[in-house]
């Protein structure tokens, strides 16, 4: 009987991983809505399961401004915004039906970092927080689902001064 020798050759490869600094945020945070030179604080639920963000909006009125469709709406603390309509979104609701919602671009400040994000307008009075921040606004952040209020409340800097 012949003995067969098996040689196992293992080559070790060096793997390199680039680590990018990421900010840890909680599942509930206070963020700022930036509108011109003003910044308004708002309580938000951070939701990586939602594609986009949504804000509590009432008195939603569509109008035309210089040939473009715009939306005027009220939100918490009687804040009123006028924004150009970006698109209309079909959103699947909890009961599996679809709802059409206007979508605008809102500039949010999360932990001192400005993010301009698609935000749909909907009455969120039955929800615990008036703003839901979806994953399209969350790149560079890690979410600690067991913690809240991990971010600083610093104002966003003017992009021209950075």
Image (cartoon, helix red, strand yellow):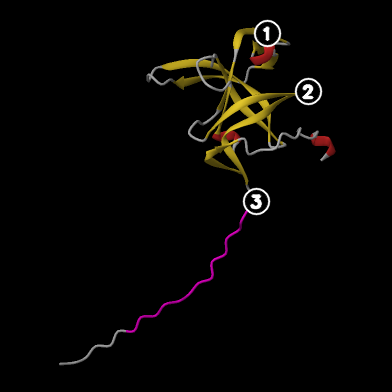
Where does label 3 land, which residue?
21
Residue 147 picture location, percent across and down? 55, 39
Counting residues from the start of the chain, the first of labels 2 and 3 encountered is 3
Question: Disc 2 vs disc 1: which is toward the camera?
Answer: 2
Question: Disc 2 vs disc 3: which is toward the camera?
Answer: 3
Question: Element at badge 2?
Answer: loop
Q: Residue at x 54, y 14 (%)?
A: 125
Query: Is residue 4 located in the magenta-colored stretch of the structure?
Result: no
Query: In what quadrant of the picture does the N terminus appear?
Result: bottom left
Question: Disc 3 vs disc 1: which is toward the camera?
Answer: 3
Q: Is residue 3 above or below residue 65?
A: below
Query: In what quadrant of the picture does the C terminus appear?
Result: top right
Where does label 1 land, which residue?
64
Quarter location, residue 120: top right
Q: Residue furthest right?
A: 161
Residue 96 picture location, percent across and down? 37, 20
């Amino acid at each position: 009987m012949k003995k067969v020798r098996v040689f196992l050759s293992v080559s070790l490869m060096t793997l390199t991983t680039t680590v990018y600094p990421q900010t840890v945020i909680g599942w509930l945070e206070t963020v700022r809505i930036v509108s011109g030179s003003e910044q308004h604080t708002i309580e938000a639920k951070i939701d990586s399961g939602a594609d986009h963000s949504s804000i509590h909006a009432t008195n939603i009125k569509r109008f035309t401004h210089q040939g473009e469709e715009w939306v005027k709406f009220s939100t918490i603390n009687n804040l009123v915004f006028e924004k150009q309509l970006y698109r209309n979104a079909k959103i699947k609701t909890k009961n599996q039906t679809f709802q059409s919602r206007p979508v605008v671009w809102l500039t949010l400040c999360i932990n001192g970092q400005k993010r301009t994000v698609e935000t749909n307008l909907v009455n969120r009075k039955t929800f615990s927080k008036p703003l839901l921040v979806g994953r399209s606004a969350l790149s560079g952040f890690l979410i600690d689902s067991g913690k809240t209020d991990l971010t600083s409340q610093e104002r966003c800097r003017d992009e021209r001064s950075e």
